[in-house]
Amino acid sequence: MERQTFSEVLQNWYERNKRELPWRNTRDPYKIWLSEIILQQTRVVQGMPYYHKFVDKYPTIIDLANADEKEVLRLWQGLGYYSRARNMHQTAKIIANDLNGKFPENYAGLVKLKGIGPYTAAAIASFAFDEKVAVVDGNVYRVLARLFGIETDIASHEAKKVFGDLANELISAKNPATHNQAMMEFGATYCTPANPGCMFCIFHYDCEANAKGKQAVLPVKSKKVKVKKRYFDYFVIERDGKLLMTKRGAKDIWEGLYHFYLVESKYKLLQIEEIDNDFLQELLPVSIIKNSSEVYKHVLTHQTIEVRFWHIVLSEDQSLTLPLDYEFYTWEAIEDLPKPILIEKYLKKHQKVFKI
DNA sequence: GACGCGTGGTT
DNA sequence: TAACCAAGCGT
């Protein structure tokens, strides 16, 4: 019997070991796209409920295109990397309005769309349209780096070419979709970052990393994240049972999400007597600081934020000049606003106080 | 092309 | 516990 190719061995393993995932049972580019955007930098278990929510609420790309951005962000709430949702919505509109509701059917067309980069274009092109183009994601980097003992820094520009070329040499011409799924599934469930199952691996005798005991150092990744500290004092200003909120702008975290009146400091949280903010100085002497919350520590990949909430109640007849773009929202309206998980947690914890 | 962008789980 | 990770992309 003839020796099997790498891809055949891999695909055999895949057919026997794959997880049943809903987006693997469709050729609908819309659903495949949806799943791929959701899964960017996100675990399957975390993304799964969102995939179902989006498919249920927006069964077609037309439904998604017709939604308000606010509504899309609200459904995305808690998944993080919110630009994915904004770009996805923008792209839905372009496909619905300019492309007659049809996805481009190849890599080159797909990669031009916002939110669809090299990985996602290859995924959709192969899964939905059987194009022979290799996906190169974090799993593929890891599997290839270990199998072939490649020490090229996966954060480097060079790695894109080295690993991309290799992945495209290995891909099956017959079953590019299954091959791509298999590569990622193997990396995600078997050739894992920590504690890979080398002992019983199908490539046990062919793997460079296994032969040299280099599983722990491959793939090589140089970039270390620098964590910046930030300090947020939120002023939760209540009047007539409503809370003052605004939409966050561009060029910072949580763009498009809603939050309270924020005073950010460079080195520490505020003492109340240190406040030298015009709006608050006008407002504070005539209001009641109902309470200040415990200090929350909100951790993001690149920053750690210490946060305190000051709950301030205004009398109903108190006049004040609202800062630009701020509005009072009822509890019901607030529930429909997309919010950072930090704000959501605070509201949930204190809802008895607010929901009178 | 280096950096910024979330959240939750694991080591 | 701090560090690292998880189906990347835009600027």
Image: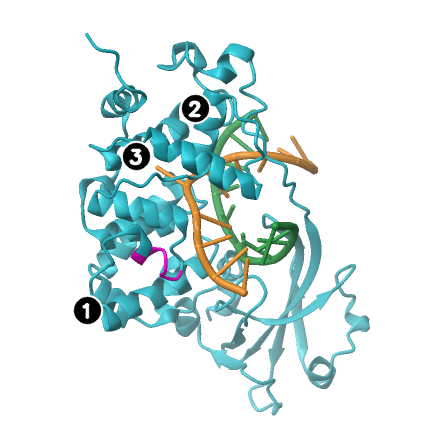
Chain colours: A cyan, B green, C orange
Task: Check the picture and name the quadrant holding the N terminus of chain A.
Answer: top left
Magenta stretch contains residue A112 = yes
Q: CA distance from mark 3 to mark 1?
A: 29 Å
Q: Is residue A197 left or right of residue A64?
A: right
Question: Badge 2 is on which residue?
Answer: A191
**Residue at image coords 44%, 27%:** A144
**Residue at image coords 26%, 30%:** A172
Q: CA distance from mark 3 to mark 2?
A: 14 Å
Question: Badge 1 is on which residue?
Answer: A100
In-front residue for pair A145/C4: A145
Q: Which residues are magenta?
A: A109-114
Given this view, does label 2 or label 1 mark the residue nearer the observer? 1
Q: Is residue A114 above or below residue A237?
A: above
**Residue at image coords 27%, 23%:** A17
In primary-sequence order, the first of circles 3 and 1 is: 1
| Rendered location of residue A353, percent (x, y) | 53, 66
Question: Badge 3 is on which residue?
Answer: A181
Name the subunit of mark 1. Answer: A
Determine which of the numbered discs, if any, sits on residue A306 in the image.
Answer: none
In-front residue for pair A123/A105: A105
Kind of residue indicated by mark 3? Gln
Kind of residue indicated by mark 1? Asn
| Rendered location of residue A61, percent (x, y) | 23, 62
Mark 2 vs 1: CB contact within 8 A: no
Q: Is residue A329 left or right of residue A300?
A: left
In-front residue for pair A158/A81: A158
Crowd band around label 2 with a 10 angstrom C-alpha radius: few (<14), some (14–19), many (20+):
many
